[in-house]
Image: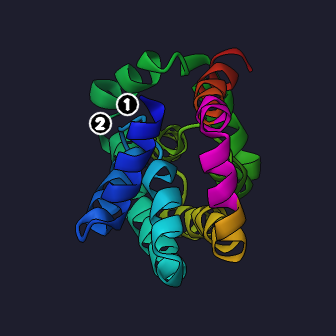
């Protein structure tokens, strides 16, 4: 079953509308969707190594633009949407600590948290609720998301065939590790 899902994901990644799908997921992940864009970024880069930089650029730009939606949720609609979203992720206690840390470390928090498996929407919503400077938010988001997505694209571009071979030979291990990383991000968010 996993082999079939992997083959299907690679087929979707090679499809002519894959870039639009990844852009939509990247945009939504920065504001409300719990699915990271890496699930399309990785197979798309493996399927189209010559477009690795374009794929990373689209993913970065749409993630930053989607971050504005998360920022707006925190800024304008925190009580109506932001609080319930953070409560859904069991992150309200983290939010309070996060908000107070913004006064001293704002941009660094965005850069560091944007590189981790912790959902970026939590960073964007908290940034808006903390009324963090929008220009600094934009620059920190660009740095963070560029580092993350371009690093993934660079590794896949450089080591694509060996990585693809590794994934195909050890598909169950790779999917288990990806699932563990996703769940781990939520566990870290919940208990740290």
Is 172 magenta? The answer is: yes
Render colour scheme:
rainbow
Task: Please indicate whether residue 107 sits to the left or right of residue 42 in the image.
Answer: right
> Which numbered disc flags the more N-terminal residue, 1 or 2?
2
Above or below, 53 against 191 in this view is: below
Secondary structure predominantly adopted by residues drawn in magenta: helix
| Mark number displayed over residue 77 | 2
Q: Please indicate, yes or no, whether residue 71 appears anywhere in the rendered image.
A: no
Residue lying farthest to the front in this orientation: 169
Task: Please indicate whether residue 40 sits to the left or right of residue 107 in the image.
Answer: left
- Circle 1 crowding by C-alpha within 10 Å: few under 14, some 14–19, many from 20: many
Residue lying farthest to the left in this orientation: 17
**Residue 103: x percent and y percent?**
69, 46
What's the residue at 39%, 38% (across, down)? Answer: 4
**Residue 127: x percent and y percent?**
52, 46
Q: Quadrant of the N terminus?
A: top left
Q: Secondary structure at mark 1?
A: helix
Q: CA distance from mark 1 to mark 2?
A: 6 Å
| Circles 1 and 2 in contact, beta carbons < 8 Å | yes
| Mark number displayed over residue 82 | 1
What's the residue at 33%, 41% (across, down)? Answer: 73
Question: Magenta region: which residues?
Answer: 163-177
Q: Nearer the viewer, residue 70 or 174?
A: 174
């Amino acid at each position: 079953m996993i082999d079939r899902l992997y083959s299907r994901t690679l087929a979707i990644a090679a499809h002519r509308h894959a870039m639009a799908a990844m852009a939509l997921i990247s945009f939504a992940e920065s504001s409300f969707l719990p699915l990271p864009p890496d699930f399309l970024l990785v197979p798309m880069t493996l399927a189209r190594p010559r477009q690795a930089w374009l794929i990373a650029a689209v993913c970065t730009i749409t993630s930053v633009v989607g971050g504005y939606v998360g920022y707006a949720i925190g800024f304008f609609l925190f009580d109506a949407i932001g609080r319930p979203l953070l409560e859904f992720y069991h992150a309200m206690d983290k939010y309070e600590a996060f908000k107070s840390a913004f006064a001293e470390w704002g941009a660094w928090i965005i850069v560091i948290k944007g590189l981790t498996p912790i959902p970026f929407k939590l960073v964007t919503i908290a940034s808006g609720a903390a009324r963090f400077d929008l220009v600094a938010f934009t620059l920190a988001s660009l740095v963070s998301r560029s580092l993350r997505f371009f690093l993934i694209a660079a590794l896949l571009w450089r080591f694509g065939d060996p990585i693809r071979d590794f994934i195909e030979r050890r598909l169950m291990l790779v999917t288990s590790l990806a699932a563990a990383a996703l769940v781990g991000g939520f566990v870290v968010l919940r208990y740290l």
